[in-house]
Amino acid sequence: MISTREMNFNNKCCSNIILSIFFIFLAEFVCCDALLRHHEFFVKEASYTRLCETKSILTVNGQFPGPTLYVRRGETIYVKVHNNGRYNITLHWHGVKQPRNPWSDGPEYITQCPIQPGDTFNYKIIFSMEVGTLWWHAHSDWSRATVHGAIVVHPEPGTRYPFPEPYQEVPIIFGEWWKEDVMTVLHEFVAFGGAPRDSDAYTINGQPGDFYPCSSQDTFKLNVEYGKRYVLHIINAVMNEILFFAIANHSLTVVGADGSYTKQLTKEYVVIAPGQTLDCMFEANQVRPGGRYYMAARAYSSATSITFDNTTTTAILQYGGGGSVLTTTSPIHPSLPYYNNTTAAFDFLASLRSLGPLLFPLNAYDKRIISTVSINTFPCNNNWCEGPNGTRLAASMNNISFQNPSIDILEAYYHRINGVFGTRFPQKDPLNYNLVDPPFRNTVLVPINGWAAIRFRASNPGNVYIFTWIFINC
Ligand SMILES: [Cu+2]
């Protein structure tokens, strides 16, 4: 048995709605080859102190963020989950295609029954073409706020990254922290029909950083050596906000996104939406011995009248060789685009290109589907809810909210029952698509009043679950 490696560190009314579309690839046990690896995840409560207050949070193995899974491309691993918490839970392996293996995908009530308190479930996770950074997270209510962790996928044995070999690779996980219990936050906005209350902090690898009370002592620090190259495996695990991220005096070169290589893209900042990952390389090229530089992240939110968590989370990049200078020099702060800088956000997102080679011709497709995503409203008794004019907010696809299918979708798939799916998708002429090198992503941002064209190949028999997360950054 090989145990999980631990992470290598010290550790609202909506004028502007941005939606993410997630593809969860759903789809038998093949046994026993030399690559199998086994991990044990114990879901349990643990006491954490942040922002001067202590509370109990749900964790895996007592860690926030949870343990990093290190795998190689093409490996199959098993993760045995023991639910020692108070709530039902499932875990989802975000972006792992799991060929013909929907039964371990994880969404609660979609591909499996929840793991009840006291029960265990053994996930089989089949990695195929993914490489770079992915992540895992709880898929029940808001438990993913604290139950999540990185998946780092290295190239197959005997192969290398298509970029200079980094000296060190470091997971950087953005989280979101509420002083209140996250289940209370969830129950509150479900009861009142509005948006979730703003969080109290963002975190980098579990720590808010120097600009929050009672936090600077434990700010995450990354020690670097002059002249070395580093790769950051960046994951946005926050609940609600798209983030800008930058490191003072260091350009970031994106080399991968969502578990797939990209053409190298060098920028002073990056943009990352909840659910997305980026692999960013940088060179420790600052000559000041003992130099300290902030890594910082804050929200992108373009609306004018709606509140959001506008705080800034930081970590510190520090150079060795400075002796006592290290602790006395105040870190240099990067300049991040302003909160509502839509141009900066979409300039970055539109610049990402896949590395290829392309798996199949880009101008070929068999069926075109137009789907809309939005936030609708439902009436609320006596108009007392917190949506516009006392209504209740409800996310929709194709203008449909909260309509359950007549039969369980996996049951229909398993028993080969036809006629379960609707066909109400309109057709429309294509726009100017990138048919050369669009990025290969599992989470796509759709801007307010905008659109995104996504092409996918039906190469994974089973049920494909497409869903939206809606960031009410309005
Ligand atoms: Cu996910």
Image: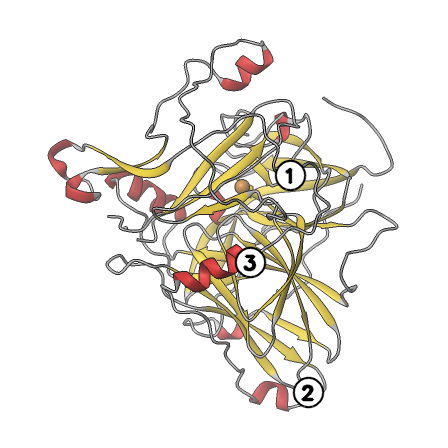
Q: Is residue 32 above or below residue 172?
A: above
Answer with mark 1 or mark 2, whichever residue precedes in sequence.
1
Q: Is mark 3 within 8 Å of ligand 1?
A: no
Residue lying farthest to the left in this orientation: 382
Query: Looking at the picture, which amino acid does disc 3 mark?
Result: Ser
Q: Is mark 2 within 8 Å of ligand 1?
A: no
Residue at numbered disc 2: 287
Dot in front, 1 or 3 = 3
In the foreground, 311 or 431: 431
Query: Looking at the picture, which amino acid does disc 1 mark?
Result: Val
In the foreground, 451 or 223: 451
Dot in front, 2 or 3 = 3
Picture quarter with the N terminus: top right
Element assignment for label 2: loop
Q: Which mark is residue 351?
A: 3
Q: Quadrant of ligand 1?
A: top right
